[in-house]
Image (tube, rainbow, N blue to C red):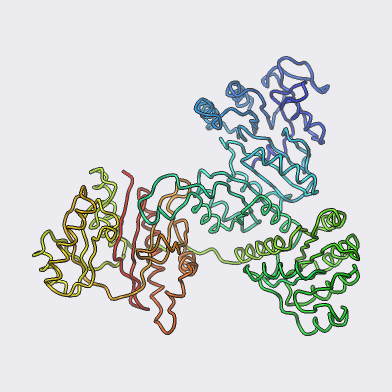
Amino acid sequence: MLEKLFYPKSIAVIGASRQEGKVGHSILKNLLQHGYRGKIYPINPKAEEIFRIRAYPTILGVQGEIDLAVIAIPSQFVPSVLKDCVNRKVGVVVIISAGFKESGKQGSQLERELVEIIRNSGVRVLGPNCLGVIDTGSSLNASFAAGMPCRGNIAFFSQSGALCTAVLDWALEEGVGFSKFISLGNKADIDEVDLLLTLAEDGETKVILGYLEGISNGSRFMEVAREVSRKKPVIITKSGRTQAGARAASSHTGTLTGLDTAYEAAFRQCGIIRAETVQTLFDYAIAFAQQPVPRGPNVAILTNAGGPAIIATDAVENSTLRMASFKEDTISRLREELPPNASIYNPVDVIGDAGAERYEKAMKTIVNDPGVDSLTVILAPQAMTKVKETAEVISKVSSAVSEKTVVASFMGQLEVKEGRKILSSGKIPNYSYPERTISALEAMVKYKRWKETPLGKTLYFEVNKKKAEEIFTKAKEKGKANLTTEETREVLSAYGFFLPRRIVTETSREAISAANSLGYPVVMKVVSPDILHKSDVGGVKVGITGKSQVVSSFEDIIANAKRFMPEALILGVTVEEMIEPGKEVILGSSRDPSFGPLLMFGLGGIYIEVLKDVTFRIAPLTSDEAESMIREIRSYPILKGMRGEKSSDLAAVREALLRLSQLVSDFPEILEIDINPLMVLSLGKGAVVIDSRLTIKI
């Protein structure tokens, strides 16, 4: 895929300029300066030649095939030129020009024109409003960036052109190599999914990095990313995570769902490593690019300074990694090799006067311990420290034990500058602070676990989908977004949820009859399409054991509802059988504009929004994903059973999550649904829906 974007045999630069400082001048200069070996056709109606290369007034005048066209002209002329590219059957077009949807209404209309022009044309478009594309393997620099990265095995794509230039400048200073460097711009056509598919098969790319501001087709992205991440690590920084949700939400699920929650869940489910910052993005990238993934979580630390070693140890203890336990042989050898005042247990402190030889002996002994999966080497520059020699030793020992992961933290700047260069040449990732080394190692170990975990299967139950469809159709015909409690119960029942028996009553006398029929104790609740959270208005009474209580509860519920919500339509009061005590959990779903149904699970009841002990996934769920949701919440031990308590029926909870996943996947019109609480009974007794609400798109 996108062969002509990265390996074009011929390029037309539309808007090529003789004037230095113009974008079209920089693009042409970059192509020539950095060794592109194909044919170049400058397109400029006012020039006969540029850089001693024949220029053409339009692309239509060029003879022969054109694999790639780069457009750098004012936005209003781009649609016409793009039509010429389509007529010339150009393979790929890179639109550098800005002034499209990023600039307002008029620009958005221009961009829609571009999309319409290329529809069904066979021409692919990168951009508009982008920096361009770089491929170091083919010596292609079809961008207006200042510089060319050295060749490497990291591919980077970004929605931000400015970030591309900053990262490129950093890479040139640090000597970090890239295979490909792609600025996505507005993503009118080529997007992150296209690039993931291409980079997954690219032999020059070992690690895929991305900076994203949004994803338009979330389900397709997840489908592709899940496959690609099994082949290569995909590390992404996603901005905008602290913004409030795009719409006000009335349900618990909606209230707890921020704009970023769906991205977090989606990335997790498809094996994408999320980097919190741009620095972390490249910390992880360098580790994956230069070192093997650790075989396991056991970390050893080698240092010449106690404080930094403690910091690194704390970082390990606060992560999913473990401090390695040395074998007796390892400890004995370290005791023989190191001074008496050195620490021979993990972390190993060779003390401040350590030279390169002492580092080498300790390092060889540690990496040969079968219980060590990775080694962090810390160096704090002191008067006696041999920085360059130590860096050379680390590189030498690491190359001799290629199956062990070695990272370094040469702390400081000026004093360790030469050592850092040596480490970089020796493919040893180096970080200024020890916490960053541990973070990178943890990302690698988590990725290994992801690759080794079999992809689960989505389970489907026999349900009455037709019944639910009928209920939704009738609600839409009435223009009713919020389903009644009875309608919601019918939908859930159709999908196999267990619900308590209930009778809707309009008078206290009917309520007494219902309670006698169901048997005491009973629960009573207000019935109103306008009251979403019944307990908030005093609309719920529990543990009712006699006729007099039924009457007083009925009157209280009606009075409370009218007092707190005088405009609400009150249809009556339900009388329900009272379920035996259990643990209250919440199940919910809200529809994310990019990824679709976002499922939530957590500890339920009235404190859900305060405790926020919840976890999220994108539907449809696999059985393993449902199980993970249950285990992730902080209050999982409560469900499991504490201090002699019986375990809750966790299998019933898992089934409820899977049934909810099936329901919201079957019906895209479901905007929000809450099951709160789902009363989870003791082991083997199931789980019962106590209260629920459902909102659809009309």
Residue 626, compared with residue 47, is above or below; it is: below
Q: Position of residue 467 (x, y in %)?
A: 26, 55
Q: Position of residue 210 (x, y in %)?
A: 63, 48
Q: Quadrant of residue 445?
A: bottom right
Residue 524, compared with residue 239, is above or below; it is: below
| The C terminus, quarter of image | top left
| The N terminus, quarter of image | top right
Q: Position of residue 534 (x, y in %)?
A: 27, 59
The answer to whether residue 578 is left or right of residue 260 is left
The answer to whether residue 609 is left or right of residue 22 is left
Residue occupying image coordinates x 71% and y 58% = 288
The answer to whether residue 645 is left or right of residue 233 is left
Q: Position of residue 191 (x, y in %)?
A: 58, 41
Residue 540, compared with residue 563, is above or below; it is: below
Q: How many marks can you see?
A: 0
Q: Quadrant of residue 68?
A: top right
Residue occupying image coordinates x 71% and y 16% = 45
Q: Quadrant of residue 158?
A: top right
Name the one closer to the observer, 16 or 639: 639
Name the one closer to the observer, 128 or 162: 162
Name the one closer to the observer, 262 or 32: 262
Residue occupying image coordinates x 71% and y 21% = 43
